[in-house]
Image (tube, rainbow, N blue to C red):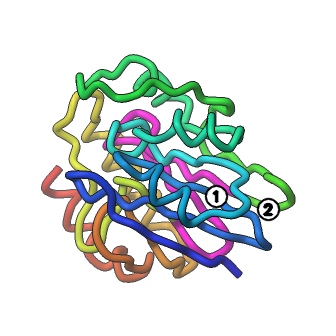
Amino acid sequence: MVKIKQKPCGMYMTNCYIAEVDGKEFIIDPGIDADKWVKQNVKNPVAILNTHGHFDHVWSNAELKEFYNIPIYTPKDDVFMLQNDPFSQNTPPSKTDVEVVGDEEFEIDGVKIKYLFFPGHTPGCSAILIEDMLFSGDFVFKDSIGRVDFPFSDAQDMKKSIEKFLKIQENYKIYPGHGESTTVWREQNTLPNWLNYI
């Protein structure tokens, strides 16, 4: 069973999550000022998991990696954002330890983590599956999807990602990068409409 703590952080109210499985904690998308909250709420962190490379999701990467001496997992195609600050936000640079390629599964301290590759919002945009909970980053929100008008976004990739998402059969609970939680089946009802607007 996964225990979840959630905190909207920074001016963009980016959800940072702490997902605990068997006493091991995964820090997901530590954004702006997330480090303070994380330090107050973790006991045994084992990894930092990035859904994608946007600054409001990775801002506290370096601080937490150094403080806890734990690895950072980031989709390979977004790693450049962690070093180059492409949006000129003075984002603290961080170094990825594990570059995630496509749909890749890991076992971290005995806990299975699976990345699901949904590019479009960013080149490496992914969701992270832990048991029956899907941390969707900025790919899918409740009643919405991630924007595709940013630098490095790709509308055609987003369409393919939506089509891939529509094939998921399990009704995972979704914890997005912004806003409220939802479910796979709920979003599958509305996502086909977005294919016409992208």
Residue 20, position in %: x, y?
Answer: 67, 70
| Residue 126 drawn above or below residue 122 | below
Asked whether, in this view, residue 113 is left or right of residue 111, the answer is left
The numbered dot on residue 161 is none
The region drawn magenta spans 113-134
The numbered dot on residue 111 is 2
Q: Nearer the viewer, residue 54 or 165?
A: 54
The numbered dot on residue 26 is 1
* Marks 2,1: beta carbons within 8 A: yes
- The residue positioned 68% from the left and 62% from the top of the image is 25
SS of the residue under disc 1 = strand
| Residue 129 drawn above or below residue 80 | below
Residue type for callout 1 = Phe
Say which quarter of the image contains residue 192: bottom left
- The residue positioned 22% from the left and 53% from the top of the image is 12
Residue type for callout 2 = Val
Whether residue 130 is in magenta: the answer is yes
